[in-house]
Amino acid sequence: MASQVATPTSLQTTTTSSSTSLSSPALSPSSPAQLSPDDVELLAKLEEQNRLLETDSKSLRSMNGSRRNSGSSLVSSSSASSNLSHLEEDTWILWGRIVNEWEEVRKKKEKQLKDLVRKGVPHHFRAIVWQLLCNAQNMPIKDQYSELLKMTSPCEKLIRRDIARTYPEHEFFKEKDSLGQEVLFNVMKAYSLVDREVGYCQGSAFIVGLLLMQMPEEEAFCVFVKLMQDYRLRELFKPSMAELGLCMYQFEYMIQEQLPELHMHFQAQSFHTSMYASSWFLTIFLTSFPLPVATRIFDIFMCEGLEIVFRVGLAILQMNQTELIQLDMEGMLQHFQRVIPHQLDSGPDKVIQAAYQVKYNAKKMKKLEKDYTTIKTKEMEEQVEIKRLRTENRLLKQRIDTLEKKGAPRYSEESVLQLERELVQARLKEAESQCALKEMQDKILDMEKRNTSLPDDTNVARLQEELIGVKLREAEALTGLKELRQQVRDLEEHWQRHLARTAGRWKDSPRKNALSEMQDELMSVRLREAEAQAELRETRQRMLEMETQNQIHSNQLRRAEQESRCLQECVQTLTLQNKDLNGQLQEIKRRQAEIECKSKEEVMAVRLREADNIAAMAELQQQISELEIQKEEGKVQGQLNHTDSSQYIRDLKDQIADLKHEICCIKGQKGLASQPTFDGIHIVNHYAGDDGSYQSSDEDGVKVPTLRDSQQRSGGRIRLQPNLGDTDSEEEEEDDEALRLSVPQSGSHKSTTV
């Protein structure tokens, strides 16, 4: 282990030999009572090593400068293998155990793993750990990467334009057409082809650039796809950026709740949250903080998601609250751009520690998300209503203009007033209809509630049984009451008789008095017996009433339990239906996305075919033009080669020979004035033949005899085109000039022009 350092792609095989089972109950240094002394010492060394790695810029340069090709690791291994200290060996051993036993650690010791990630992942292990954190290993899309690079993306120009703006001062990306810029272009192009709805967004290049600093381009592509799908980044980078608006809404609420004074200052200065925090969420602080600090925050983002962005953002505001309250808008912008990044030059530990002191309530964030969705829905409805009203207003204006053009002004005004009255009446009728409809709906709801409150047939039968039982008990009570009343009447009669007997007791003998006393005692006993029976009857009556109430309550409880079971079954049924509907919805969304991708691909293919067809049509038109030229040339050639044309040419040759002969005769007979002549022959053109050139002009003033063989007193103009077949090309070009023989039909002056 100390003599060889492996790249992240081969970490698992390198650390196998030195890894043992991670059997300690905890990995976090926050619970040292559960760790062995060796593990505690190892964790302390790990923290120190992470601090050194984050502050050492040379390690980053060596890490980024060691890339030789797109398939090799971006981590410097050759230079580190010879300088590994004992502390680095311990770091490799601990993280090697975690990587090799990842599934067990992720399931059973997730809290301890989070604590370690918060303290920083060593840059040697970042590639493999980031892939494990987002489950980007062995993705099927990795096999499609090479095929995607062969395709053409509509976003290539935009990607090329922004490549030079991504990490312009970093060694790996700053040179034009370097390896870093090339692999960054490849990954961005491949993703724009995979997700055509998102395509390319400028901020995403910084995240891909950070991934390429840690791992080869194929693995960086897979990790980026996972981040877009599972870490809300895809919603952030959509063209509408609705998710970014939600994040701004949630973050502003946190500021209002935890930093009210700063929030009031922002409101007073019209300093919106998006002016300084949008880049935090789009690039995970990569464009706002120094690269070592942003990388540590990105470690936590890979493990915990966007929650760390909210925490770190609020921690930054808490640390700078005093300074920000004293600044105006421009001063605050300058403070965010220049002062805050330099505050983190010492390292990220302070801001990360402050971030986890921030209160973050996930349930509250969910509620804010629902509120934001409701607000946006209302805004959309208001926009639709405004658009509808504008359309209606435009149509009414068009109708008014039409009416004004058709009739006189007074008729148009009357029409407008009539239309306004009709509109008011229509609105009133509509309002009355709406009120009536609402009343009917309320009545329907009331009837439905009453219907649901009415018992069913089973409950009616039970209530009838209960009523019969109550009536029987009431009859028994009435019978007992009658008996009790009869006993009371009997006792009253006995009492009256007793009073009558005791009226003359003082006159009777002692024996009679003793009998009377016994009768009195008997009467007292009967009275007490009657009272006891009355109390017994009353107790029985109360007991019957209690039993009746108990039975009624039991029946009510039984019905409530039945209703509860029915409601539970309904809830379970609705839950299953909701799950099925959610599954169907996800499937429909997936199919819709696939259909949209296919439609976009088909549109692109159709456009390519149209371009090919246009090019083919242009070629065919060029070929048609060439064929027409060849056709015309063929026609001319055919005319020249035709038999009649040859005969015509021979006739012309004969005529030319005759003319030559006549010219010679004219020259030979110059000076003979006594012979009959024409007014004169004027040779105004030149002819170049095989025998030489013959020229003549009107300055000779000769008079010649009649040219019987050539002119024959014919009127009009004759056009001669002698194209001699036995002459060469130069002579053919000269023969293109026509020889015209013209003889006027009237007048005494006749001339022939050759």
Image (cartoon, rainbow, N blue to C red):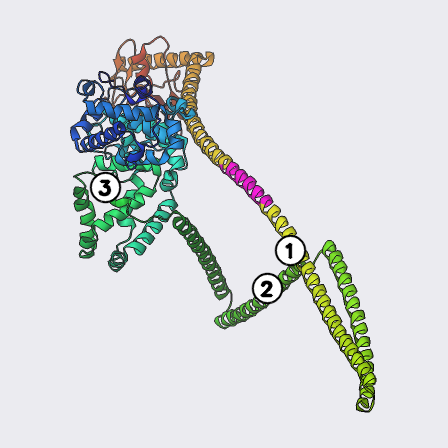
Image spot of residue 754 (x, y percent): 32, 21
In the depicted structure, whether residue 654 falls above or below residue 529 = above
- Which mark is first along the chain, 2 or 1? 2
Please indicate, yes or no, whether residue 179 appears anywhere in the rendered image.
Answer: no
Q: Which residues are magenta?
A: 572-589
Look at mark 2 in the image and give the residue it sits on: 438
Q: Residue 581, located in which quarter of the rendered image? A: top right
Image spot of residue 222 (x, y percent): 37, 28
Image spot of residue 301 (x, y percent): 32, 37
Gap in angstroms between the C-alphas marked 1 and 3: 65 Å
The answer to whether the residues at label 1 and label 3 have Cβ atoms under 8 Å apart is no
Of residues 686 and 564, the one nearer the viewer is 564
Look at mark 3 in the image and give the residue it sits on: 288
Image quarter where the N terminus lies is top left
Q: Mark 1: which amino acid?
A: Leu
Q: Is residue 573 magenta?
A: yes
Q: Which mark is residue 557?
A: 1
